[in-house]
Image (cartoon, coloured by chain):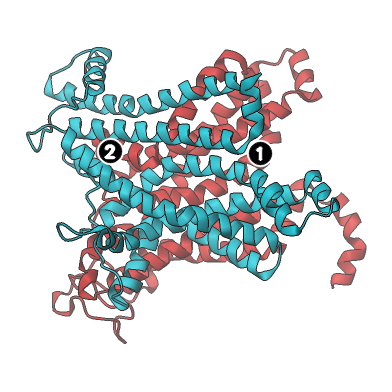
Amino acid sequence: MSAVQTTSAPDDTRRRGPLAEVVFSLLRSRTFLVGIAIVLFWVVCAFFGEHFAPYDPLADDIINALSPPSAEHWFGTDQIGRDVFSRVIVGSRDILTVAPLATLLATVAGTALGLLTGYFRGIVDDIVSRILEAFMAIPVVIVALLAIVALGTSKTTVIIVIGLSFAPIIARTVRSAVLAERELDYVAAAQLRHESAFHTMFVEILPNVIPPILVETTVRLGYAIFAVATLSFMGFGIQPPSPDWGLSISSNYGMIGGGFWWTVLFDALAIASLVIGVNLAADGVHGAFND
Amino acid sequence: MVFLGGQVLPGNVGRAILGPFADQRAVDALNHSLGVDRPLLVQYWSWISNFVQGDMGTSYIFRSPVAPFVIDALGNSLKLAAVAFVLVVPIGILGGVVAALNLNRPLDRIISLGGLSVTVLPEFVTGIILILIFGVWLRWLPISAAWPKDAGFFTQLYYLILPALPLFLVLFGYIARMARSGMIEALDSDYTRTAVLKGLPWRTVIWRHVLRNALMPTITVIATQTGYLIGGLVVIETLFRYQGIGSLIFTAARGKDFPMLESGILTIGIVYAVATLIADFLYSVLNPRIRLGAEQ
């Protein structure tokens, strides 16, 4: 099989489009496959978790509260007797809704800003870039604290806060890609045809800067999960009674001094696996585009 | 080079000021609902001029001046950050250097992958796992950072190890990665080859030629991580119930104690600016080209 591939490889490369080429190299990357497998596992849990979770993640059972892992409750029960295993499975739902939406917002806003600053340069670039740099200097947690004081806690606030905090980073990546693209002949041709600036930016340049945007987006998704989990843990993100992992840790970690480790350990491991999965996948995407 | 330094520094001050600025909008929103609405700039000016004179205002919750709280909290946070930094900077650099010298061998793989995995994990996740291992199962370290009153230096240090570890882990990955790539680049350079061909001992080449050049980008990264470290402090101090500037901001935000919140954030802005300044200074010590530029 490999011998066949090596001999026909040059032909294949010419016949496949650039997209197919990237997909092909992704499927060969072990890092990507491991990462995407972990992520898909949690996505399946998010969608169908309640169908195969053994208990209702929200049903309390005070008599069996804080019972350690056993045959009935694989991961034990929490302080009001909810089954930790079921909660961990269903707990992926909110974080896997909020983090991708925040990343999407960051990508759209960041791409638009990056195109504007990279294409116009000059004073537009100077002003917008300084503002973006200032934003990047403030830690996300602090921005979130302030926004939540001003706007109140909700999933929408979290999406907006994380989306807008990450937008400058994506804008910076897009800007540097656009700076290189705008010197190329096809941009000059578009300008000579008197295409509008909008057309040149979004129809001519944008398709050519998609690869760096995709790479940056996958990396940002990892950070978005990091940020959502942290905010939920701080009590500023996803709200009870959601079985969200960060939230569960936050409501149970006060008791770990008493030895009730099962109430937090599995949630912590779930977050860890998801974050590492996304980062492995992102690493694979990065490699596929930079080969 | 001097001109460049002059360009960069005002930028830092701007960043420092932006903290309270963003905050002022939040304040404004509340002022609207309370009906005490002064023009943004007027408020901002009176507050900032008081701050410069050392008057941070009065806490809404404690009904007493903010300044002592902020100063205490800052001291505590600096202790925690210092423990994390003292551990992570040498170990991180060492890790990166060792990885680069063993490029693509198993040791390099372990350091790079391990560093990457712990860097991407949220602090509270590593924190929880470390608490479980060292605090609950092994019972080696206390699970709360609140040391007994009048604790000596070493007792305090003992209580700070566990909170400092998650910060250490997150920063370790960044620093090791930068040190590693800096080393690889320096090892691959012409001046390293010249030094080797001159017949200098390998040890001298590494110490005198490679390290100096390799560590410059690392220093910049360490400085930029201060901003990140502050975000991490908010989480860690909450997790370990530690009375630092992070938990001060957190409590103030929850209690809508604006004078406390603003002072906390402006203090962080100042710390950030100072850290950047120190990094610029260190950078010029390490890089003689900048010093030469200044003399000309």
**In which quadrant of the rendered view does residue B29 lie?**
top left
Is there any visible trace of residue B61 in the rendered image? Answer: yes
The residues tagged by marks 2 and 1 sit, at their Cα atoms, a distance apart of 33 Å
Which residue extends farthest right? A7
Q: Chain of mark 2?
A: A
Which of the two discs, 2 and 1, labels the residue nearer the N terminus?
A: 2
Could you say where residue A199 lies in the image, as x and y percent from the top left?
A: 66, 21
Q: Residues within 10 Å of mark 1 (few under 14, many from 20)?
A: some
Could you say where residue B127 lies in the image, as x and y percent from the top left?
A: 35, 62
Of residues B163 and A209, the one nearer the viewer is B163
Which disc, if any, is residue B33? Answer: none
User: Which chain can be seen in red?
Assistant: A
Residue identifier under label 2: A148
Q: Amino acid at mark 1?
A: Ile
Q: Chain of mark 1?
A: A
User: Disc 2 or disc 1, which is closer to the eye?
Assistant: 2
Question: Which color was chain B given?
Answer: cyan
Q: Residues within 10 Å of mark 2 (few under 14, many from 20)?
A: many
Quarter of the image where the C terminus of chain B is located: top right
Q: Is residue B249 left or right of residue B225?
A: left
Of residues A8 and A273, the one nearer the viewer is A273
Q: Secondary structure at mark 2?
A: helix
Q: Secondary structure at mark 1?
A: helix
Does A45 appear above or below A161? Answer: below
Q: Residue at x 58, y 18 (%)?
A: B3
Does A20 appear above or below B254? Answer: below
Which disc, if any, is residue A210? Answer: 1
Could you say where residue B64 lies in the image, as x and y percent from the top left?
A: 8, 33
Quarter of the image where the N terminus of chain B is located: top right
Q: Residue at x 32, y 78 (%)?
A: B138
